[in-house]
Image (cartoon, rainbow, N blue to C red):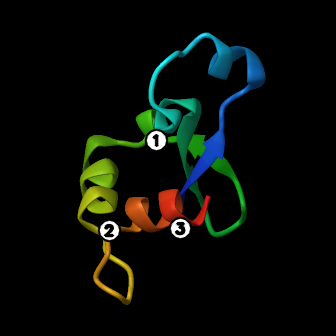
């Protein structure tokens, strides 16, 4: 399981003026490749993802943003 940032739809991105990061959606990718919106996760799962760090000690969400 991991978090990923994906581009919002062009219509959603156009409707969101402001910082470029707002044009991304956070998704949770299960081991089988199924994607779910971060907001769909149970509160305990969101808390676990928020605390998760990669092998370099960076928050996984930050790594996903930097890789995009």
Labelled disc at residue 59: 2
For discs 1 and 2, the disc positioned in front in the rendered view: 2
Residue highlighted by disc 1: 38
In the rendered image, residue 31, in percent from the top left (x then y), is placed at 63, 69
Residue appearing at x 27%, y 42% in the figure: 43
Residue highlighted by disc 3: 1
68 w.r.t. 9: above or below = below
| Distance from Cα at disc 1 to Cα at disc 2 | 15 Å
| Distance from Cα at disc 1 to Cα at disc 3 | 12 Å
Locate the C terminus by quadrant. Answer: bottom right
Q: Which image quadrant for residue 10? A: top right
| Sequence-first tag of 2 and 3 | 3
Residue appearing at x 48%, y 30% in the figure: 22
SS at circle 2? loop
Q: Residues within 10 Å of mark 2 (few under 14, many from 20)?
A: some
Q: Is residue 33 left or right of residue 27?
A: right
């Amino acid at each position: 399981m991991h978090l990923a940032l994906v581009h919002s739809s062009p219509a959603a991105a156009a409707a969101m003026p402001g910082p470029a990061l707002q044009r991304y959606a956070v998704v949770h990718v299960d081991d089988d490749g199924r994607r779910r919106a971060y907001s769909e996760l149970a509160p305990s799962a969101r808390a676990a993802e928020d605390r998760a760090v990669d092998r370099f000690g960076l928050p996984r969400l930050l790594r996903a943003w930097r890789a995009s």
